[in-house]
Image: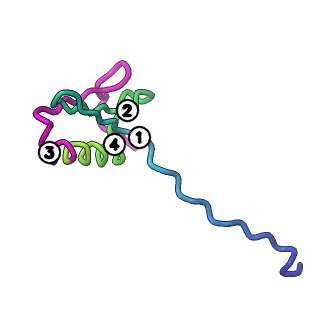
Amino acid sequence: MSVEDRSVSAPKAPEPDPEFVQYEVVDGVATVWLNRPEVRNCVNWGLLTQLGAAVERAEADPQVRVVVVRGKGKAFSAGAAST
């Protein structure tokens, strides 16, 4: 096989992290949504990391007076993911 016959594919870009946590502020209330309803908002490393970042974001915002954490779907959270 000659060099010209070899196809070289570009490396794939890493997939962006899913949005496990959603954040919004309305009238001084920061609402943090756990956003894994398909697994009843089981906490995995990605969700935990994003949750921490959302709390830090709220703490740094002088307009935020209170933080409410809610779960999307039928459950707040089923607990920690085992895998």
**Mark 3 belongs to which amino acid?**
Glu
Q: Residues within 10 Å of mark 1 (few under 14, many from 20)?
A: few
Q: Confirm whether the magenta stretch covers residue 70.
A: yes
The tag earlier along the polypeptide, 2 or 1, is: 1
Between residues 7 and 80, which one lies in front from this camera angle?
7
Residue 37, given in percent of the width and then of the height, sits at 40, 27
Closer to the chain start, of discs 4 and 1, is 1
Quadrant for the N terminus in the image: bottom right
Q: Nearer the viewer, mark 3 or mark 4?
A: 3
Q: CA distance from mark 2 to mark 1?
A: 7 Å
Q: Secondary structure at mark 4?
A: helix
- Neighbor class of circle 2 (other Cα within 10 Å; few <14, some 14-19, many 20+) is many
Q: In the image, residue 18 lies at what x, y percent?
A: 45, 43
Read off the residue under disc 1: 19
User: Range of the magenta residues?
Assistant: 57-83
What label sits on residue 59 in the rendered view?
3
Query: Which quarter of the figure has residue 44?
Result: top left
Amino acid on which the number 4 mark rests in the picture:
Leu
Residue type marked 1: Glu
Main secondary-structure element of the magenta-colored stretch? loop
Residue 47 bears which disc, if any? 4
